[in-house]
Amino acid sequence: MTALAVAERLGGEKVLRREIRSELDLAEAVGIGFPTRAVEVVLKAGLLAAEEMYALVVPRRTLAHRRGKQKILSPEQSDRLARVVRVLGRAEDALGARDSADRWLRKENRALGGKRPLDLLGSDAGTRMVERVLGRIEHGVYS
């Protein structure tokens, strides 16, 4: 999934308050921190359930505090949000449809030691594992 596609799923220029044309643009936006509105866009689109967002990206109380003070997400939270959105998009591409991707991400996977792919997206190492399995799927190897 391209940086532009990730940015669009986060609300695009309107929400991110900057144009994202490249990986470098996205990296700079992550380094500054995304507006909390990007979380709302992802939740409203149904890409993640609220509890999944709180577990993977930003705790509920922290998000409420940042919204109330009109603060942005930290660079670490922004990075996790971009990473999760990128992998969700890649799963859709690999599996051909959003509903298929949603089911795959939320079902225990033998190739991932019986863990649900979504549960591994909270860390870079876990994300790399999920991406390797998606790569195998993209190349016709069932996982």
Image: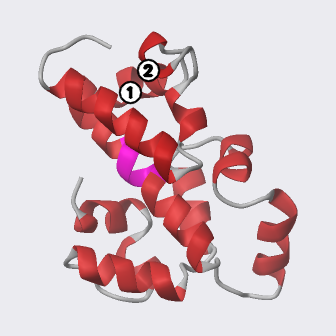
Q: CA distance from mark 2 to mark 1?
A: 5 Å
Q: Amino acid at mark 1?
A: Ala
For residue 32, say whether it is visible.
yes
Q: Give the image location of residue 111, x and y in percent.
A: 42, 16
The image's mark for residue 101 is: 1
- What residue lies at 61% left-to-right and 68% top-to-bottom? 77
Which residue range is magenta in the image?
Answer: 84-88
User: For the residue labelled by badge 1, is the local secondary structure a helix, a strand or a loop?
Assistant: helix
57 shown above or below 106: below
Question: Could you classify mark 2 by the number of other residues whose Cα lies within 10 Å: few (under 14), some (14-19), or many (20 or more)?
Answer: some
Q: Are marks 2 and 1 in contact (CB under 8 Å)?
A: yes
Horizontal side of residue 12 vs 37, given as left or right = left
Residue drawn where x is 63% and y is 74% of the image:
36
Residue 96 visible in the picture: no
Q: Main secondary structure of the magenta part?
A: helix
Q: Is residue 26 above or below residue 1?
A: below
Mark 1 packing: few (<14 Cα in 10 Å), some, or many (20+)?
A: some
Residue 82 placement, left or right of 1: right
Number of numbered labels in the structure image: 2
> Which residue carries the number 2 mark?
104
Looking at the picture, how far across and down is residue 29, in whole percent?
A: 42, 83
Specify the amino acid type for callout 2: Trp
Q: Position of residue 33 (x, y in %)?
A: 55, 82
Q: Which percent across, then down, holds residue 91?
A: 33, 34
Q: Indicate the quadrant where residue 72 lies.
A: bottom right
Left or right: 54 in relation to 131? right
